[in-house]
Amino acid sequence: MAKRSLALQLDEVVQAMLVSLQPRPERAPDRELASLARVARGLRDLPREEFRATLKSDLQRRASMSESTAAAKAGTGEEQARAVHYMRPGLSAITPYVIVRPADRFIEFLKSAFGGVERMRMPAPDGSIMHAEVAIGNGAIEVSDGNEQYPTAPQAIHLYVDDPDATYARTLQGGASSFYAPTDEHPSGDRWGAVKDPFGNHWYIAKPRGWTPEPGGLRSVQPYLHLREAHKMIPFLEAAFGAEAMGVHTSPQDAVLHATIRIGNATLEIDEAHGENQPMPCHLHVYVPDTDAVYAQALRAGATSIEAPRNAPYGDRAAGVKDAWGNSWFIATNLGK
Amino acid sequence: MLRRTDSKPQGYSSVTFLILGSYIVKATMATRRPARKLSAKGAGEGVPAEARASAAAGSPNERVLVEAAQNDAAKFDALYELHFERVYAFVASRMRDRASAEDVTSDVFHKALANLASYEWRGVPFAAWLLRIAANAIVDHTKRAAREFPAPNDPPEPAGDADVQASEMRVIEHRAQLFRLVGQLPAVQKQVVYERFVEQRSIKEIARRLGKTEGAIKQLQLRAVQNLRAQMEGSHG
């Protein structure tokens, strides 16, 4: 019975401790109980297991992002110069191809919000935009009104800028709606804000620590794919494009929290779709050294054909495939002058 | 700043010196006197006088771990695992509520990760570096809270100053060890501890959730606390 009464006594001490605003219960009557009460007082500050696990995930995600920043920086100097022969001048290995309507208004948005510079515009016979190219920072975005075969497909783009706050403000002036204003609290450690533009694209506007914009530096424009079963995208890209996964961080349940994937001299990012970051199947323009080989690899890796390799009138060997997530990959090799 | 003696004790290799706990014991033994009241919580709670480093307080590998993380941020995990309980115990002892303790702890590790490159190995243990970040984060948080939610009738948050006294460190190490030991309890005891102390559920509610009698829950609570006490005594030799 003595033991049972100790259980009751201890609980009285614990109960008093938990409900009382006083940090300390009444003086315990005997040494046995007093020593147990000391342990119990320590338990009052016990951290939540979920907090411990979540913070760990957050830190992994942030570590992954700082890693990919460094890796992307390292990979864009000399290699870019070497690799450029198979790319159309002004484009890197991965360029988002944004199909939205009306494309001309979208181009105006890119100019006003991001200081975009229109480099090319090819009108279709009906006056819509068949193809346009807008440079942003050291990267570029391709734009089209699309057609029946290629309906509108906004996408998520991670944009590195000099001044995220000013850029964010300009996107709002251009009609974008805010997910959140730039903050230093983002898990990446970068100053980071997020908006949705009037055309449905998501923009993650960020400035990495210690970044200086320069032609050979980190890419200003990186596609960001939110995917279901994102972990399966990594082997697909490795097999299809010879991509390299850098800093893959997963949750205890194996969901991809963040991964940076490098193809040639450029990178894209993926994560498991969550919250407002739901899948947005999109179009990406990928320059590779050998379109025919990559097209064949992509089909073997499970993609379906949109268009077999052909010599396009603008001087590229071009093909198209669709992946299992519904994203279209325009594969191209610039055939030179 | 973690207060410490000016020079390393003779005969201690730098590796030994990394073991923060023993380092604190040295400082404590040298200056033993009645525990100073440090904060509303945590001070003078009769920590065994012989408290010394837990096995996890530092290890000969720690320098290797820090350098690995400096070269590859993905390796920061190992440092987090090693120091989470210590940082949390320290922050929780100075904050008034759990939400603030979590905010500040999160802030400390994010800052540590972001500034890892600036940490230099000059005889200051990595744990001491983390706790200095923590002490500053607590002061910042307290100032911010006072600005955003002025509550003149409330007692001030017991944030203290940015100094971490050796005697306070002993309490922190003791707490951190207690938190680690909870993870080693038999599953049902562990569950009772979390339900009771973290979720702050009543015995009745826990009994309902676990499908047991209230008497059984009180017994499990007692067993858990007794187990922890025995382990704590064991870990302090």
Image: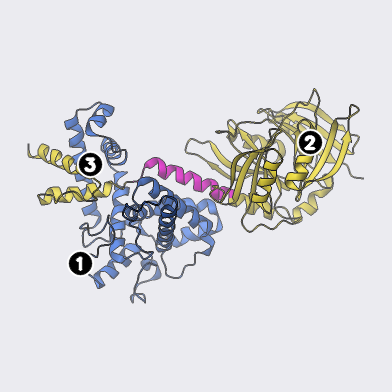
Chain colours: A yellow, B blue
**Foreground residue, A103 or A312?**
A103
- Same chain, marks 1 and 2? no
Q: For the point 21% across and 49% down, which residue is it?
A: B229
**Foreground residue, A267 or A25?**
A25
Mark 1 = which residue?
Answer: B34
Locate the N terminus of chain A by quadrant: top left
Q: Which residues are magenta?
A: A47-65
Residue A71 locus on image (x, y percent): 65, 52
Using residue B105 as the reference point, say whether residue B9 is left or right of it. left
Using residue A240 as the reference point, say whether residue B141 is left or right of it. left
- Label 3 neighbour load within 10 Å: few <14, some 14-19, many 20+: many
Amino acid at pointer 3? Ala
Mark 2 = which residue?
Answer: A105
Amino acid at pointer 2? Arg
Instruction: Name the dominant secondary structure of the magenta segment.
Output: helix
Looking at the rendered structure, which numbered label has been put on residue B174? none
Q: Is residue A58 magenta?
A: yes
Callout in the foreground (2, 3): 2
- In the image, residue A18 sits, relative to residue B112, either above or below, namely above
Q: Can residue B24 be seen here?
A: yes
Q: Secondary structure at mark 1?
A: loop
Q: Secondary structure at mark 2?
A: helix
- Label 2 neighbour load within 10 Å: few <14, some 14-19, many 20+: few
